[in-house]
Image: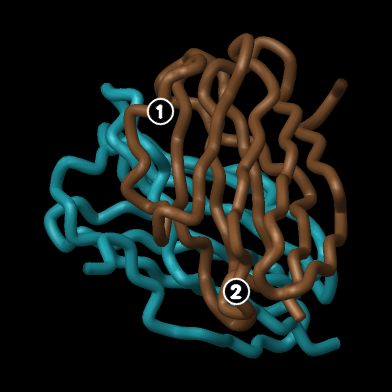
């Protein structure tokens, strides 16, 4: 039973345009969400997070939106750059407990110059 | 060290042999996670340590897999009688005692069972 879902395995975007990566979760107990980026042959690196008390968090070109009622979050990258090409993992956990972080299957983003 | 360190970076082993993978977390991080990523797949949770204890071992695929952590620091993941389906990148991550902090990953160990 996949608790964190990323239904798009891949996404291609033109350089300079907006990239939107989507994520859905099923466990209503999750209240802290993270996005990680992974380049080939490297470990995932933390990108941005959001707590369930917020519906938006912005860091430079990266913005995460959270819709709790829909159990949906999205990562917006604008403007997209070729260096953003990577696999993006959505992750979730319960903030108030020492629970494991559950990852989605990832979305491979290609930014075309 | 400054980051999470994993060794070896690559390991090729024969089917049926045992392997040991090592993870050195960031100093002071009490939470430690093992994940694996098979070819074309996402991150599969294996086991989670809080200090030296493992409150969640639910992701270990079989009894051939075990892990331990000593001194609240280094962790080893052991796979006995390796099978070809064990081939994957094994990733270790650690996080601090703060509940809402992100986990930092090592570069992984690429295990190939031939």
- Give neighbour class at mark 2: few <14, some 14-19, many 20+ (Cα, 10 Å): some
Q: Which mark is residue B42?
A: none
Q: Which of the image's four quarters has the C terminus of chain B?
A: bottom right
Q: Position of residue A83 (x, y in %)?
A: 84, 68
**Chain ID at mark 1:** B
Q: Is residue B50 visible?
A: yes
- Give neighbour class at mark 1: few <14, some 14-19, many 20+ (Cα, 10 Å): some
Q: Is residue A3 shown left or right of residue B54?
A: left
Q: Which of the image's four quarters has the N terminus of chain B?
A: top right
Q: Which mark is residue B54?
A: 1
Q: Quadrant of residue B94?
A: top right
Tag 1–tag 2 contact (CB < 8 Å): no
**Residue located at (28% from left, 67% from top):** A2
**Chain ID at mark 2:** B
Q: Colour of chain A?
A: cyan
Q: Secondary structure at mark 2?
A: loop
**Residue located at (37% from left, 41% from top):** B57
The one of A35 and A60 positioned closer to us in this rendering:
A35
Are tags 1 and 2 found on a single chain?
yes
Q: Position of residue B21 (x, y in %)?
A: 72, 45
Q: Which chain identifier belongs to the brown chain?
A: B
The one of A107 and B35 positioned closer to us in this rendering:
B35
| Residue B65 vertical position relative to residue A50 in the rendered view, above or below | below
Q: How many marks?
A: 2
The one of B37 and A4 positioned closer to us in this rendering:
B37
| Residue A57 vertical position relative to residue B90 in the rendered view, above or below | above
Question: Separation of disc 1 and disc 2 at Cα?
Answer: 25 Å
**Residue located at (79% from left, 50% from top):** B107
Residue pointed to by mark 2: B83
């Amino acid at each position: 039973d996949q608790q964190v879902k990323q239904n798009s395995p891949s996404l291609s975007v033109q350089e300079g345009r907006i990239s939107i990566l989507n994520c859905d979760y099923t466990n209503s107990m999750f209240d802290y969400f993270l996005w990680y980026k992974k380049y080939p042959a490297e470990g995932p690196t933390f990108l941005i997070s959001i707590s369930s008390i917020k519906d938006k968090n912005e860091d430079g070109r990266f913005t995460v939106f959270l819709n709790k009622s829909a159990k949906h979050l999205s990562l917006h990258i604008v403007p997209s750059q070729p260096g953003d090409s990577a696999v993006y993992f959505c992750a979730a956990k319960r903030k108030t407990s020492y629970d494991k972080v559950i990852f989605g299957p990832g979305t491979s983003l290609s930014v075309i110059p | 060290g400054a980051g999470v360190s994993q060794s070896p970076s690559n390991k090729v082993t024969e089917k049926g042999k045992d392997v040991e993978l090592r993870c050195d977390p960031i100093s002071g991080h009490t939470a430690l996670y093992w994940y694996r990523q098979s070819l074309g797949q996402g991150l599969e949770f294996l086991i989670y340590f809080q200090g030296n204890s493992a409150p969640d071992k639910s992701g270990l695929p079989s009894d051939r897999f075990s892990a331990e952590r000593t001194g609240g620091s280094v962790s080893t993941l052991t796979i006995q009688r390796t099978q070809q389906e064990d081939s994957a990148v094994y990733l270790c991550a650690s996080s601090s005692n703060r509940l809402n902090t992100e986990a930092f990953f090592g570069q992984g160990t690429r295990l190939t069972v031939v």
